[in-house]
Amino acid sequence: MEISSCELPGIPKVRSGKVREIFDLGDSLLFVATDRISAFDCIMPDPIPGKGAVLTGLSAFWFRRLDFVENHVLATRFDDFPKSLAPFREQLEGRSMIVKKAAPLPVECVVRGFLAGSGWKEYTASGSICGQPVPPGLRQADALPHTMFTPSTKAEAGHDENITWEDCCRMLGDAVAEQVCVLSIQLYEAGRDYARERGIIVADTKFEFGLLDGRVILIDEVLTPDSSRFWPADRYQPGSSPPSFDKQYLRDYLELLDWDKRPPAPKLPPEVIQQTARKYHEACERLTGESLPPAGA
């Protein structure tokens, strides 16, 4: 069952993001991952089959594995959900989780281990990443000398924008900024090392944190193909953009079109939809060791 949007009569929707629908359950929130996919900050008109299940299953896996950082998860199995959600089982099972109510911090915590994406573009122009100096002579997709924390703004619409460490401290306060920086690097390096054992290079990723009773906790999603750049280790070749398990494949296809990257986004051909779905599912299977059924199956 593909889901591009989700409505649950009688349960108030808090907001609808690029991928997730969030509902208010009173003392908790219900996160529902749809099969929508966005690229260049535009939502594509065609869903990717099973994508919501991959995002939910992978995030649940990582939240359990990286439990050295407190997170927002309360329940991921539908059988543990409130009985009030029973009528919506077909829509929700496999693609939703119940989470604590935390106040999201207004910063995306981006962590980079390799030179790619916007970091590569900035490096070729100025020799830096988010204003932080990087040694000269690096190639595209080279490993960085050390893990870099490069925060950005959080945009509900349009593009996130990279910010400096000083901007991050002004937005969060010195103590919280330092805490999320340390936690983000620890999470990335733990995930990177595990993924490498499974044949995947995590080039970069982003985390989100929130405040709950004054504590910083990990929220949203963790190390998914939507929030990360995944490369197959056996095909990794510095000096060019490696093949990927994430939506870079979709971006590469869209770059070939005569499209100005503004809505409305173009329809996707069946082969691009199917290949994108395969890449998401393969990443999930490699990392978790399990074949994931489509949500609702």
Image (cartoon, rainbow, N blue to C red):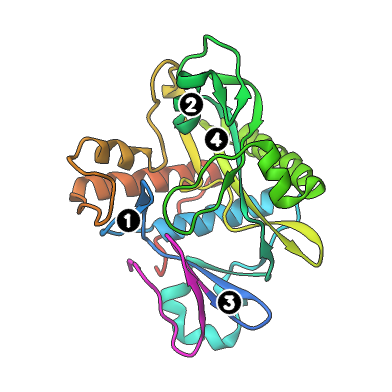
Residue 125 image offset from top left, x and y in percent: 46, 21
Q: Does the segment drawn in magenta span residue 257?
A: no
- Give the mark nearer the N terminus: 2 vs 4: 2
Which of the labelled discs sits on residue 199, or is there none? none
Considering the image in quadrants, where does the N terminus appear? bottom left
Name the amino acid, label 2.
Glu
Residue 135 left/right relative to 180 = left
Q: CA distance from mark 3 to mark 2?
A: 47 Å
* Residue 175 sits above or below residue 99 on the image: above
The residue that appears at 42% across and 43% down in the rendered structure is: 282
Q: Residue furthest top?
A: 137
- Which residue bears the numbered disc 2? 122
Residue at label 1? 48
Disc 4 target residue: 204
Q: Mark 2: which secondary structure?
A: helix
**Which range of residues does the magenta coloring cover?**
1-22
Amino acid type, mark 3: Asp
Query: Alpha-carbon distance for marks 2 and 1?
Result: 31 Å
